[in-house]
Amino acid sequence: MMESWYRFQVETVNSQLPRAQNTKKDERVPHFIPDEWQVKFLTAVDDKQSIIILAPTASGKTYASEYAMKRTSEHGLCIYVSPTKALVNQVAATVYARLTARVGVFTRDFRRDIDVCKILVTVPQCLEILLLSPNHQKLRNKLEYVIFDEIHCMGTELGDDVWEKCMLMCNTPMIGLSATVSNGDEVYNWWTRIEKRRSELYMKPERQVNIIRYNERLADLNKYRYSGKELYPMHPIGIMNSKQLIERGSLPVDLSLSPKETLQLHDALQETLYATMIPDRKNDDKLSIITTTTTTTVSKSSPSPLVSHFGDDWTVERTKCNKFSEDVLQQFRTMIEKNEVQKIDSVIQNINKGENQFEYPERKQSANLIVEFISMLRDRDLLPCIVFSDSRRLCEQNATTVGKDLERKEEKLRSGRDKQRMDKIKQELEEIEKDKKRLDKRSIRNKEECVNNDDMRNGLNGVDSDFYYKYLPECTLIHRKADKEMANRFVMDAKETNPELVKLIERGVAYHHSGLNAKGRVAVEALFRNRYIQVVFATSTLALGIHMPTKTVAFVRDSIHLDALNYRQESGRSGRRGFDVQGHVVFVDIPLSKIRHLTISRIPDIAASFPTSITLLMRLLHLYKMSGDENTKIDSCNRALILMECSFMSTLSNKNKILADVQLHYHFLYSLQLLYRLHLVNGKGNLVGIAGLLTHLYYYEPGNILLGYLINEKLFHTTESLKDIVSILAFMFTSQPWHVTPAQRENLFLERTEKRYSSTLFLPSMSERFIQMVHGYNEIVKEVYICYIQDVIKILREELPNEECILPISNISFYEKSDYDDGTFEHKLKHHYTQQPSSAISPFAGLSGLTDEQFMQNYNATSYDLAFNIDLSNKVVPFMDPHDYNKMNLNSYALDFYINGNKSQLIVENQLQAGDIFNFTQDFLLLLASIKTSLQTIVEYEEQQTAIETDLDFFRSISNKFDEIHRKYKESFSKAFPHRKYRI
């Protein structure tokens, strides 16, 4: 009886099981009642402590950042760091609306109220500028809190190493927010080490670091496969297989089940366990459960696990059900850990028992599939929906397909079902038009008559007017309760720059990606939250912090970019707080093997990176030199020390600590040597010459260092054609290749001739002088860094003895001081090793006779020839690959835009995506602006010098050339994008 009652609640009430809620109000946040974990972060903010908050999307972790902003003093500053520029404006608007504080914005191409704001919203790259610029010392002094949103980006291409550098250089409490971090303890240990070192250097009490975890989602996620206009539920365990589970060792830590899914797994486990029982000969009332390691005896009359777990309560409460779910999952995990293959397979088969067979993926054209899918969601009240795919073009195509289908449906209705009413309204309009003409011929004698005439001119009543001029309700996805007036404002604002998008918005459909301009993005985001737009086709950028909760998330078409991290981020959008108790995740046209991989894979760890580079060293030297008073100099020095001593890599293990510390120490020493040889620092370590210019081009490292070398070698002085200078810059700072074979390249040239293209398509062959200078620069780099490599490996051999003597895959080891039997493999390896000269080369690569000199002569940063795996990326060793520039097939879009100024040609001829053109051309314009401004500053400085010999003529010559290039490029850019806001 009781088991049936509990089973009914868990299976039928499911996600609507009552949740235990905190009823104790907190005067610090009067607008909501915080949960226990939220009270912890409120207290931590009050105590000015650093906090790492790991909680699911829409769980309420953002309240921590809002409270930190609210607690910022009147003359203090709180910085909110967004992972992407697209999120900055939304955060700024939200903060201003909720807190009414002065909000500043700082991105690479736009800035507002930086020096006078209380809350600054920025991106990591711009925070780095604030932390390293001597001009922003006052701003750093009033900094009280830094909030890093989506800290998992630190381990991705999006984050690179800039997140780590910012966290190391912030001498303030920090808040880190994320829903998808698997190695939170490692980040916590790293922050704790940073705070300990800060307390030692600044001689202040150590700031406490808190890590707060909350794993409970407020909305369960139901997962489905779509086929044949139906949704087929998927149990997360039901799509797995024993081989993959055992290979991975366990289930993902963040895997959660709804109450109904938990009961299904529980029943499948019980069925499997009882199938393996045998009667106990000593007692008929008992059964023996046989496992791989033990035999356990249980009684047939024992209470069921449901009764045992919920027996103290009449009503099943959600928190207790979650505990039951953890117990059931742990029981299944135990099977995996014990490699019980047959039982695992049995459980999975029991879960899938009775499942209907269906064709998946469905063999149907993509356009028809999408139209039917959206129609099905509408019929089942599963809108709003975000449909994710990793192609901008596919997003736009799918949105257009749905929009056109709604248009065709309306045309069909108006010419069929509603034809009689349409004809009647047309006839009425004709009569109105005749009346208007008659009235125009009459003279209007008084005002009252004029008013009556206006009434006649208005013609149709409101219902008929809406029916005739507006979209039919059945042919639009717009929610009937949406704010139409607000929608009209956004539509009018975006119409001029996004006419095609606006047509779709008026049907309740839209697309969203990073190539969409600001007005389009703002309109889509606001109108989706307002429920005016019901379907958005989007790329993964929408999942990075942008507040667009939805009822349903769908994944369409497989992609290499759809991995475990993106899947967790994107699926987490489903289930709107306060609206839905369940979110829905649907897979459309994605192979079951990929779905299984996404479900079973754990979230990747935040990866460590090498936190320094040669340009960073220049910026640190400049910061120290320009620090005004002694306290500021000490602060600058402390920041640099923390950066060198407390890298994330050095926290992960003792081996990594040694690798990181040795590399960082010697990298600074040898990078100083390179800067000295390139005439960028003097003997006292002060920046000289054009070093200041190069620090402004940190974004383009290591091309900025090569640029400095080319300027000093007078390449641009002797290059008369401005077009050739642009071509050189394009080679160094643009990296958009044509992915074509030689035959396809020839076909493109033939097409260019036949169609008389204006674009060059491929960057032209570079001059011999340019290539010789690149080789000359690389020779200097190699001369310096061969010594760096040798010294680092020498120290690592002392600190990590015998580490290099282990084969990476087989783990076969040989040690120089050990004795091995003659003829064994280990003896042969040792013999060859002792015959090799002491060098940086691995003993295994050394078998071929490879030497240090040969390694540097044929330098390859990605090779495994060195004895230790040290970082040789081009930010660490600023080597510019001298591989035949003329065969790199780089797209000439920057050069073509400079010559023609036509963005349409970049789409048709250069074959760039429309959404990329603004960003690509703006990036190159920003580069030109940085070079031009820096050269002008140098010229102005030289003009003020009273010495007889100055470098005025040297710099004025190239300054005039770059000024002219920038003027022409900016002019073309302004004409091509007249409605886009930018600050250059």
Image (spheres, rainbow, N blue to C red):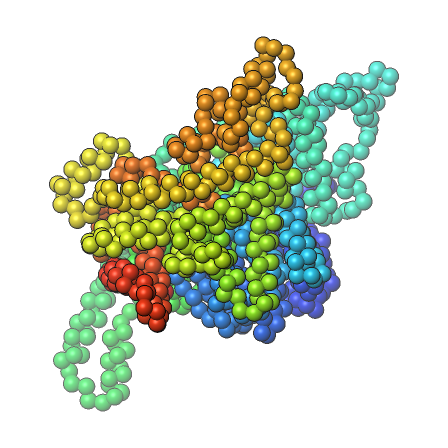
Look at the picture and state if 91 lies above or below 608. Answer: below
Residue at image coords 45%, 42%: 784
Look at the picture and state if 916 lies above or below 485. Answer: above
x, y (%) of residue 689? 38, 59
x, y (%) of residue 348? 61, 28
Residue at image coords 42%, 45%: 878
x, y (%) of residue 680? 41, 55
Q: In the picture, which quadrant includes the N terminus?
A: top right
Residue at image coords 24%, 41%: 768
Q: In the picture, which quadrant includes the C terminus?
A: bottom left
Can you name the residue that lies furthest to the right here? 282
Hey, which quadrant is residue 460 in on the image?
bottom left
Hey, which quadrant is residue 746 in on the image?
top left
Q: Is residue 913 left or right of residue 512?
A: left
State whether residue 101 appears in this view: yes
Q: Is residue 934 left or right of residue 582?
A: left
Look at the picture and state if 417 lies above or below 955. Answer: above
Q: Is residue 695 left or right of residue 316?
A: left
x, y (%) of residue 772? 29, 42
